[in-house]
Image: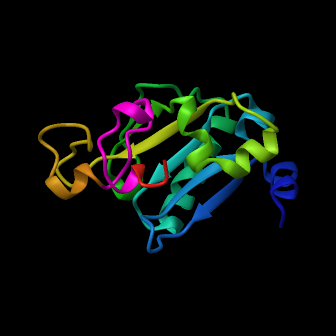
Amino acid sequence: MTIIENVQQHGWHVVMVPEDEIGPGFAYTIGLSHTHAAPELAMFGLDVHAIHRMLNTLGTKSAAGAELADGQRHPDGSDGRQVALRQVDLRWYRTFFGRAIGFYRRPPFPVLQVAWADADDHFHWEEQAQERHRESQPQLWLPPSEHPVGIWTTEL
């Protein structure tokens, strides 16, 4: 199905970008803003099929009227771990959300990053997070110029 057909039939579409030699996988929604006046959602660093399920779960909540917003935490997130929502800086859109730009024709459309906690319930920006968890996801609420250099900034 095409993006437009999925948005018409289901209210949104999930674009999955699998892990490759360039970097970890990620996925994001297209259509939540169009259909439900809700932010699009993006998630990084897990298996894209697990991300797809999580984005659909949050998309369903959003479609049912739940307001998803910057700073929220949801305890029933990814694989039983909590997730936190963070507003994505517009300067990342061209790097990660090209298909959404094509659908909407141009930014701005709101995007929230769905960040997942490690096994000890720490997020990747927290000092207590496990070392490998810190680089598992980007910090897209930061401007690209302030983001720590690493796998997520190689496409800049």
Q: Position of residue 85 (x, y in %)?
A: 44, 34
Q: Name the residue at 57% across, 49% down.
A: 96
From the viewer's perspective, tell me whether residue 90 is left or right of residue 100.
Answer: left
Vertical position of residue 145 compared to residue 20: above or below? above
Q: Position of residue 145 (x, y in %)?
A: 39, 33
Viewer-side residue, 155 vs 69 = 155
Q: Going by the picture, which residue comes out furthest to the left?
A: 128
Q: Position of residue 12 (x, y in %)?
A: 74, 48
Q: Is residue 137 magenta?
A: yes
Q: Main secondary structure of the magenta part?
A: loop
> Coloring scheme of the render?
rainbow
Q: Is residue 42 magenta?
A: no
Viewer-side residue, 29 vs 74 = 29
Vertical position of residue 133 compared to residue 129: above or below? below
**Quarter holding residue 68:** top right
Q: Quadrant of the N terminus?
A: bottom right
Q: Position of residue 152 (x, y in %)?
A: 40, 52
Viewer-side residue, 96 vs 27 = 96
The magenta segment is: 136-152
From the viewer's perspective, tell me whether residue 40 is left or right of residue 150.
Answer: right
Q: Name the residue at 47% across, 64% down.
A: 25
From the viewer's perspective, tell me whether residue 67 is left or right of residue 86.
Answer: right
Viewer-side residue, 116 vs 110 = 110
Q: Name the residue at 73% across, 28% down.
A: 37
